[in-house]
Image: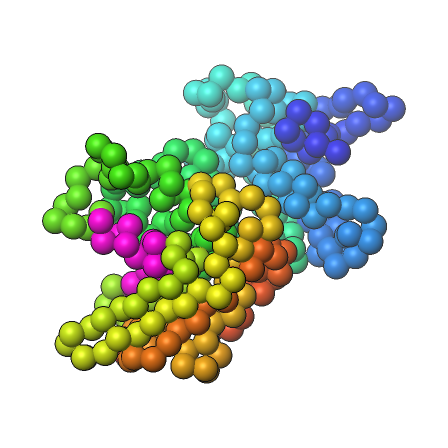
Amino acid sequence: MLMKGYIPECRANTKAGYVQGGSDGMPILGDFAVKYGSKARELGVPTDDLYQALLDTAENTPPDWYRVGRQNTAWKTFGYIPTDWVDPSGSTGLPTREASRATEYALGDFAVRQAAISLGKSAADITNDHYFSKGYFQAGNEPSFEIPWVYHYANRPDLTALRVREVVYNNFNTGIRGIPGNDDSGAMASLLVFHLMGLYPIPASTQLLIGSPFLSSFTIHNNAFGTSTKFTVRGFDPSSLTSAPPTGSGLFVKNVTVNGRVGNLCWIDFHDVVGGGEVVIEVDGDADAAAKNGCGGPLPDSLATGGFKGT
């Protein structure tokens, strides 16, 4: 059970003890996820809560890390536990055992990593969620343009779908100051158009990421190629058009076909986008299936997947 936002420490007869080094519950939860993750539901263990407990304990610093949690401010600042260092957050604890605590913190982080893999989570999920939750994301800043789509590279396009809805409805509107900053010769407006179409072009690549369109259908005309390609969103659900779509609304990409040919759920090639014919994107409201299916095939190209194809 999570106590005050952190995995409980050294409890005996309901009495709290002291943290012995790292958070000793982290390796235990990580071990459970690796060995029994597939049986968790049958055993009555909610894996989302389990993983969130690991994540909160690994990311946040409690007011008193001698009784629960870890000295994460120092750990995340230096990558080790320093001596004679005052935490600027005001958090306190017993400032001893720096070397052993660093070793145990590393083991705790390893437990989070192993749990993430076993439960279908991702380090990219963690980093991107942190980026938004801490307010680092600025919709009007060009380096933030692709950030909502980064979940694709962690095999979680379902999270991209939710995040893009949030970004659009919280930052764009049809009134005065309807865009979050300088349009920069159409950059901001172009970004919004791609968000609405459920596509994101990767520069210097023929890949476009596939998201969840805000439209039931649209046609892309390309004068250079003399083509028109129709995009149809099968199962389009107007109730998903909000910053926080209700559970069960048709938002998640279930199937993609390009002129009848089954495609990837995460990305489409530029030549298919401008090749004429029809692209059908089928969506539904099954969040669990979307999380499990991911891209339904190869992830978008990146250095992590071996680099970009020579296309």
Instruction: Decide whether residue 200 is among the magenta residues.
Output: yes
Q: Position of residue 66 (x, y in %)?
A: 64, 23
Quarter of the picture containing the C terminus is bottom left
Q: Which of these two is toward me, 11 or 40?
A: 40
Q: How many marks?
A: 0
The residue at 25%/64% (across/down) is 203
Q: Which of these two is toward me, 199 or 111?
A: 199
- Dominant secondary structure of the residues highlighted in magenta in the image: helix
Magenta stretch, residue numbers: 189-202
Mark yes or no: residue 299 visible.
no
Q: Is residue 18 above or below residue 232?
A: above
The residue at 43%/33% (across/down) is 134
Residue furthest toward the right? 13
Quarter of the picture containing the N terminus is top right
Color encoding of the figure:
rainbow
Decide if residue 197 is on the left or right side of residue 15: left
Q: Position of residue 261 (x, y in %)?
A: 46, 82
Mark yes or no: residue 43 visible.
yes
The residue at 28%/50% (across/down) is 192
Q: Is residue 96 above or below residue 303?
A: above
Q: Is residue 84 above or below residue 300?
A: above
Residue 176 sits in quarter: top left
The residue at 77%/29% (across/down) is 10
Q: Which of these two is toward me, 9 or 207?
A: 207
Decide if residue 234 is on the left or right side of residue 16: left
